[in-house]
Amino acid sequence: MHTFLETERLALRPFADTEADVDRLLALNNDPEVMRYINGGLPTSREAVRTGILPTMLTDHRCTGTRGHWAAEDRETGEFLGWFALAPLDQDSPAVAELGYRLNRDAWGRGCATEGARALIDRGFTDLGVQRVTANTMTVNATSRRVMEKCGLTFVRSYFDDWPETIEGSERGDVAYELTRPAWERLGPLAHPRA
């Protein structure tokens, strides 16, 4: 399958409408620790993956000419590690794109989230017409916040949303981060993607 982007250790490829990708996403979304800051670790049904989650991953964005979500695999072993996203907030403009990532626990603590996110950010600014990258997470999700900071994103604000599930730590709210094109240009390329 076509690889969208490669880094030293990762290959990012488009998701496919296959049972194999349904199974991968189902396992990822049913790990309570992976989903701790997303939905409090509640289980996800196969039907929810098939009819809601996977179709989102398969969305092509005409303003960028590509998808907004990619499966992340280990370049050496082909093991599914999770996914990365850089999706435009407006279907008609690539100017503002939201960064996201969700990785299996086996990929935690190895720098994979930072490596993949940096490469996607660089691709967004160099090839996809992105002018500003945004990201958000729960205030208490220190690990995700650190990845954002390592990728050059800076804290913008704290906020409180009315979420459908009450999650431990949600009383502290959420945080928003961003990286603008001028700030990225001052930093220089964050990563050295291979494709």
Image (cartoon, rainbow, N blue to C red):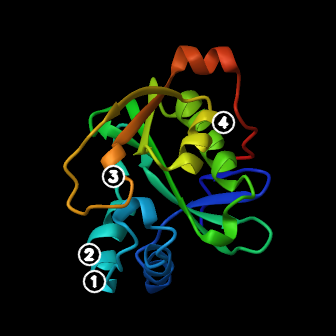
Q: Which residue is mark 2?
A: 51
Question: Pointer 2: residues within 10 angstroms few (<14), some, or many (20+)?
Answer: few
Quadrant in the picture for residue 91: top left
User: What kind of element bears circle 1?
Assistant: helix
Q: Which residue is mark 3?
A: 170
Residue at horizontal 25%, vertical 63%? 165
Q: Which mark is residue 150?
A: 4
> Separation of disc 2 and disc 3 at Cα?
28 Å
Residue type at mark 2 is: Thr
First reached walking from the N terminus: tag 1 or tag 3: 1
The x and y percentages for residue 65 are 42, 43
Quadrant in the picture for residue 55: bottom left
Residue type at mark 1 is: Glu
> Separation of disc 1 and disc 4 at Cα?
36 Å
Question: Pointer 4: residues within 10 angstroms few (<14), some, or many (20+)?
Answer: some
Q: Which residue is mark 1?
A: 47
Question: Pointer 3: residues within 10 angstroms few (<14), some, or many (20+)?
Answer: some
Quadrant in the picture for residue 62: top left
User: What kind of element bears circle 3?
Assistant: helix
Question: Pointer 1: residues within 10 angstroms few (<14), some, or many (20+)?
Answer: few
Q: Nearer the viewer, mark 3 or mark 4?
A: 3
Whether residue 64 appears in this view of the structure is no
Residue at horizontal 36%, vertical 44%? 172
In the displayed structure, would residue 61 be above or below residue 38?
above
Q: Nearer the viewer, mark 4 or mark 2?
A: 4
> Separation of disc 1 and disc 3 at Cα?
27 Å
Residue type at mark 4 is: Lys
Relative placement, left or right, of 92 versus 107 is left
Residue type at mark 3 is: Ser
Mark 1 and mark 2 in contact? Answer it, CB < 8 Å.
Answer: yes
> Separation of disc 3 and disc 4 at Cα?
24 Å
